[in-house]
Amino acid sequence: MSELDSSTRESCRWRRRKQDRPAEILAAALKMFSMKGFAATKLDEVAKEAGVSKGTLYLYFDGKEALFKAVVTEFVLPQIAKAEEQAEHYKGSIKDLMFKLLEHWRINILQTELSGISKMMIAEAANFPDLANFYFENVILRTRHFVANLIELAIARGEFRACNTDYAARSFLSIMVFSAIWQHSLAPFDEDYDIKEYLNTHLDIFLRGMLKDDQG
Amino acid sequence: MSELDSSTRESCRWRRRKQDRPAEILAAALKMFSMKGFAATKLDEVAKEAGVSKGTLYLYFDGKEALFKAVVTEFVLPQIAKAEEQAEHYKGSIKDLMFKLLEHWRINILQTELSGISKMMIAEAANFPDLANFYFENVILRTRHFVANLIELAIARGEFRACNTDYAARSFLSIMVFSAIWQHSLAPFDEDYDIKEYLNTHLDIFLRGMLKDDQG
DNA sequence: GTATTAAATGACTTTCAAGTCATTTATTTT
DNA sequence: AAAATAAATGACTTGAAAGTCATTTAATAC
């Protein structure tokens, strides 16, 4: 009944939808932050995108910074959890797992709005230290530990040569983060840039540099 | 005489220094753009840093965008020319040259204000497409061709294995650009981050991945 | 069907920074 | 030394966006 009402009552200037508003606002915020960055995103735009007024936005979130933290918590952290889980149950070589992870990154992060968050945070960290600290603690450190553990495991298994696992993890993650940054900065000017080719070439070089000579 | 005057005449509210103003303003702009990025830099701040009023700034430059292009032309392009020249006269292996280039990058770019320009441009490209296009054409493409040519030479000499030189160049440059980005974004939160260790580990992996098995 | 509640609005206030220009004053010319 | 020139100023205009709040109105309770 109320379903029918909602689509037929054109007389309504707006409807009460307390349940759905937060999610709709967060989706709009993700889109705008990803497209324009933190400072350049106007809350009026987020509100418009979410189909509400700016006042409503302040009804559900304390302001711009709170909105961003909510976006990270809602959309980014679950992705990390998913990667951790995938690794936990993986049976093959670390080399193969890294291919899988990078493929997942390309399809589910890079080519979606999520990659805009990586780029945004790194682009504006210097101007928003509180956000930067939040992101570093919750996203960067957690991801780095995850990758460093993988590399340690690969060394223990005799798959990778011994090295400083912390810095090797930074190298691997640099590839991913840089691809996100490029995607949202100069890639539009880089006419025959092929993301897949870029990631594959980079991973290929990385693995040749990490594998023991008898592996491969 | 005029030297003495300039230091003793305290009564002057300001002095006419048409010759020196542009360079002083550019140095101030480099500093501020590097510290805070393009959008967040206020021209009042640049003026203050340069020891002039905002009006004077507009006397010498057409506005914020013109100021940035002048900064790139004045400070960034000469650095690329210097690298091209260094390579031209280099006698050793490409591997050794790459070490040298990365060392030069670390000392003369990364740890100076110049690295802030790399970071700034990539951080804000999406919001300033005109600047981004200028930077891509004049800085990125030129640098990429430079590195791709080096790699091609290394392959021709039998030092590197055959590969897609364009994408291998992107990989190598990613390392450098990412280090600049990190320096000006999350490095301040990354407590035991060691730039030298990061660059060396990354270059080591890159070269092991590129060298022919009999080289090294 | 009337009263009550609270979701939603959007005009308003405030703050901030880009860009302008009439005025001031250092320097040069005569 | 007076007149002319142009370097430099800073108060002002303009516009934009964050955050507020008195009012409106959809939904619910009685």
Image: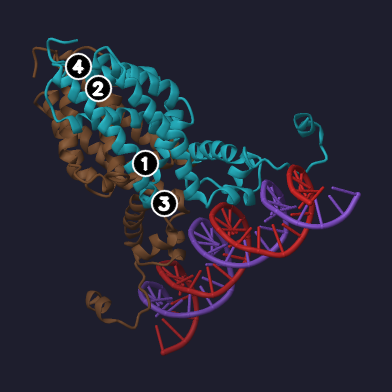
Chain colours: A cyan, B brown, C purple, D red
Are the numbered discs 1 and 2 placed on the same chain, yes or no? no
| Residue B89 percent location from the top left of the image | 14, 30
> Disc 1 sits on a residue from what chain?
A
> Disc 3 sits on a residue from what chain?
B
Quadrant of the frame with the N terminus of chain A: top right
Q: Residues within 10 Å of mark 4 (few under 14, many from 20)?
A: many
Q: Nearer the viewer, mark 4 or mark 2?
A: 4
Q: Nearer the viewer, mark 4 or mark 3?
A: 4
Which residue was labeled with disc 4? A208
Label 4 sits on a secondary structure element that is helix
Does residue A186 appear in the picture of this structure? no
Which residue was labeled with disc 1? A122
In front of the other: B134 or B179: B179
The residue drawn where x is 21% and y is 35% is B83
Quadrant of the frame with the C terminus of chain A: top left
For residue B189, side relative to residue B97 (left or right): right
Which residue was labeled with disc 2? B149
Please report contact status of discs 4 and 1: CB closer than 8 Å, yes or no: no
Instruction: Give the residue type at disc 4.
Output: Arg
Q: CA distance from mark 4 to mark 2?
A: 22 Å
Where is residue A25, by image quadrant?
top right
Q: Earlier in the sequence, mark 4 or mark 1?
A: 1
Q: Earlier in the sequence, mark 2 or mark 3?
A: 3
Q: Nearer the viewer, mark 1 or mark 2?
A: 1
Q: Which mark is residue B67?
A: 3
Where is residue A94, by image quadrant?
top left
Please report contact status of discs 4 and 3: CB closer than 8 Å, yes or no: no
Q: CA distance from mark 4 to mark 3?
A: 44 Å
